[in-house]
Structures are given as C-alpha cells and as structure tokens.
Image (tube, grey):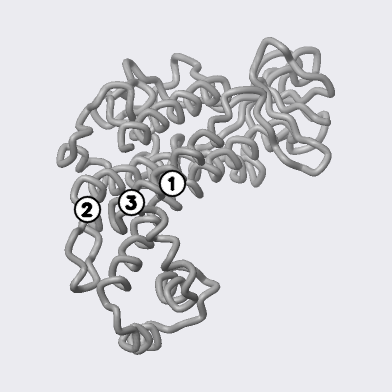
Amino acid sequence: MTFYNIDGISSANPNKDNFFIVENEVGDLLFKEGDLTFEIERLCIELRNLLAIKIFGSIEEYHKFLATPIYPFASLAGIDAEIRLSKEQFEQFIKTIEDKTSLNKLLYYCDVENLIGNIQNSVLETKYLVGEFYRTLNKNSFLVQEGLFTVENGIQYSAGPVVTNITSLVNHLFINLYSQLDFVTKIIFEFENIHTNFDVYPKLKSKSILFGDSKKTSFKEKNDTIYEMTDNIRIIMYLRNEIVHNSSIDSFPKVYQNIHNKKIIEKFILIPDFRNGLIQTFKNRKRFFNDDTKLNKIMPSLINDFWSKLINTLNHIK
C-alpha cells in the first residue's frame, strides 16, 4: 500500500503523528481518520424515512406504492437516467393514472428525496476530491524535468499541466462544499414548509432557496451547524466565490517544493491570508501570502469540521 501524506511526500509506511490517505490494493483512497461519510449517509437515510412519514403517514404506506411498478416508474422519470422517457411522454403517461393524489404525493416525495440524494453524492464527491488531491500532490514532483532544480536548498515553485490538474481539484472541492450548503438549506426550507395539498403536483417551495436564504429558516446562525459563521465556513465561502468569479484562489496557480540537498522534502499549495475567516484586503489587493498557510496542511481539519457541522445540522432537521 501507498500512504499519501499532508506534506506531499508519499511513504510505504503510515505516519502515526499526522493525517494521511492510504491507497489500498484495489485503488480505494481511505482516510487515516475523520471520515464521517458513513454517519452522513445514515442520517440521510433517516431523513428519507422522516420525509415518507410526513407525506404518506408511515413508511409502510410509502412502501405500498413501491410494490406497484407503475408508481416508481412514473416518479423517477425526469430524475433518473434509467427511465427513458421524454417530457411529452411523461405528461401523457401521468394522465393515464387515475389516483392523482397518490401520484402527486409520490412525485413530490421523490423531488425532495432527490435533494437529499444530492447531499449524499456531494459528500462522497468531497471524499474523492480530497483523496485525489493528496494522491496528485504526493505522486508528482512537479518538476519540468526529473532532478532539475533551480535551487539546491530552498523553495522553488512549479506551474504547468500537472499544477493545472491539482488546481482544478481544489477549485472543484470548494465549489462542491458550497453546493452542500445550498442543498442543505433547500432541504431545511422544504421540511419546514412541506406541502400538504396534493390535488395537483406541487412545485418545490425551496426551488429558489440558497445558502444565503438561511434567515428564512429556523436555522439562522444556529450554533455548531453549517450556519454558524465560523472561520472555516467563511474560508469555504470566500474561496468558492473567488474560484467562481475569478477562476482561482491564486492569479498564477503554483505548487511549491521545499528542497534540501537537491531532494524534495515537502510540497505545498498556499492560500491567501485570512484573519478570523476574513480575507486580508487593501483596496484592489486581496491576495496577500505572508502567513504561509498551506492548504494541504489545513484541509483535513477543515473538511472534518465541515462534516461535523453538517452532521449536527442534519440531526437538527430530524
């Protein structure tokens, strides 16, 4: 097995003192610690059950619909790629179902369930992106040519295709994390304003709701949830916005390499200076790099903190 370490230098043996990701024999990337994806998965399943009770009265009543093939087929059209049905065919199909109230309940249930599924998929994507980030950082020397150094002892940076690759992982990661903030807010708003009239197929009330609309829910700035404006949440928000609006967290993406006796002893990526989660700015300048904050060093704690707060948030929904 190969161990990918936070200093960017892989090893054949685990580092007992620091976070690492291990690649097992089949290529799976496993965290040394802090992998909360299974707990989040469990809570999402419980949310699905709660949703079924709210809409159908009981889980057993919901399962009765699943026993009738026509209902799952109708409810998943427009959501699941396995259902090969056009918009026009779907409209004609649902006209043939006589019990419109039951159909509308199931359609609405699947729409809200899809939001929950988006959270599950995004969390698993987070895990993949973090693992791939460390694998890419560890496996590549980022040198133009192997053994070619601009300094024998000191720091040199690299750019180029491999740096572009790892930068794209970073960009995707922060966009992914922010998307989870949006989806959870939609779920909360929907649960707090759940439809009860199914004479017609209802639209999601959360359709236009985003993370910034949390003030419209009971979760506004709730402590120990994703709505508490902690330093980490602010960093995620800022970096995501910087990536979306300015394409990157650095105008010239780089991977730095610490070299000692012509040997790479550390690799890292820097993020701009923050104070209490707020980016340091001076008029037009907002990318100061004096603190030497290494993304690869803070990422494990940032992700673990985010997942912990996500778990608390999902628990509060229940």
Camera-nearest label, 2 or 3: 3
In the rendering, at what x and y percent does residue 272 appear? 42, 25
Identity, as a three-letter code, of the amino acid under mark 3: Ile
Few, some or many residues within 10 Å of mark 3 (<14, 14–19, 20+)? some
Tag 3 secondary structure: helix
Residue 271 drawn above or below residue 27:
above
Question: Of the residues under marks 2 and 1, which one precedes in the sequence?
Answer: 1
Distance in Å between CA atoms under marks 2 and 3: 12 Å
Q: Is residue 168 visible?
A: no
Q: Residue drawn 40% across and 49% down?
A: 48
Distance in Å between CA atoms under marks 3 and 1: 20 Å
Q: Which residue is mark 3?
A: 53
Residue drawn 74% across and 17% down?
265
Residue shown at the point (39%, 27%) measured from the top left: 309
Circle 2/circle 3 CB separation < 8 Å: no
Left or right: 306, with 279 as reference point:
right
Expressed as whole percent of the image width and height from the top left, the position of residue 17 reads 68, 10
List the residue tagged with mark 2.
194
- The residue that disc 1 covers is 119
| Residue 224 visible | yes
Q: Amino acid at mark 1?
A: Ile
